[in-house]
Image (spheres, rainbow, N blue to C red):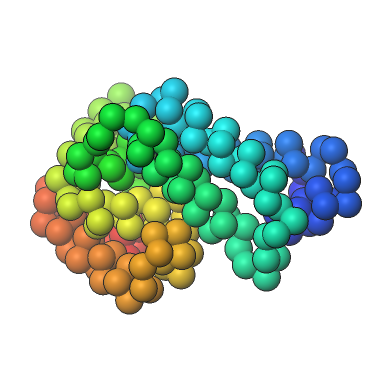
Amino acid sequence: MDARTDAELIQAVLRGDKNAFPELLNRHLNAVHAFAYRYVRNGEDADDVAQEAFVRVWKNLKKFDQTKNFKTWLFTIAKNAALDLIKKKKPMSFSQIGQEDEALDAFLAPYLTGPELPDAAFERTMARAELKTALDALPVGYRTVLTMRYNDNLKFREIAEVLDEPIDTVKSKHRRGLMLLRKLVPGDPPTSTLA
């Protein structure tokens, strides 16, 4: 794996380094695919969205304001590509847009620590299922913010940019989403991961 930062890779792409863009793509492809899946809820469509997002990045990289965060810009492009695909396909209810997939590893970190004894593995699986059920029960706005914060590791400012919402709205959805989630999850999840 290339040790260069995203900014260094972008500079290399702009200078004509043919290896830099594939590295940038490989670095972010899984996150973009998972992000797209939450919008389109279909693996093939998520593939198409991820591909379209990276085509748009390739075409517009010269226009990218390098004082901004690349990941935020990339996720904004992916969100727009997903919404474009949704518009082209049959109508989808708004309650389906933004539902979370199984990839909650960062959010489930407290349940993933410790030795993998059969009992621990079973408890981790049960905790994952309970948390997934609770997360699915949240309103889509809260669910989206929580997943972008903990699964995609975006900062509040970056989430606000991607969702095109004021940062105070994002922080409010985060706080309220955590409060609702804590009520829904049996036992209290560790606050160090949720706060």
Image location (x, y in percent) of residue 74: 57, 51
Q: Quadrant of residue 94?
A: top left
Residue sitting at x 42%, y 41%: 84
Q: Is residue 12 visible?
A: yes
Nearest the viewer among 188 and 1 is 1
Q: Is residue 102 left or right of residue 34?
A: left
Image location of residue 63, percent across then percent down = 70, 59
Q: Quadrant of the N terminus?
A: top right
Q: Quadrant of residue 195?
A: bottom left
User: In this image, 139 relative to 164: left or right?
Assistant: left
Residue under the image location 49 percent in, 54 percent down:
76
- Tell me where residue 83 appears, x and y as whole percent: 39, 44
In the image, is 142 to the left or to the right of 49? left
Q: Residue at x 34, y 62 (%)?
A: 192
| Whether residue 129 is situated above or below residue 95 in the rendered picture | above
Pick the residue in front: 164 or 27: 164
Residue farthest front in this picture: 88
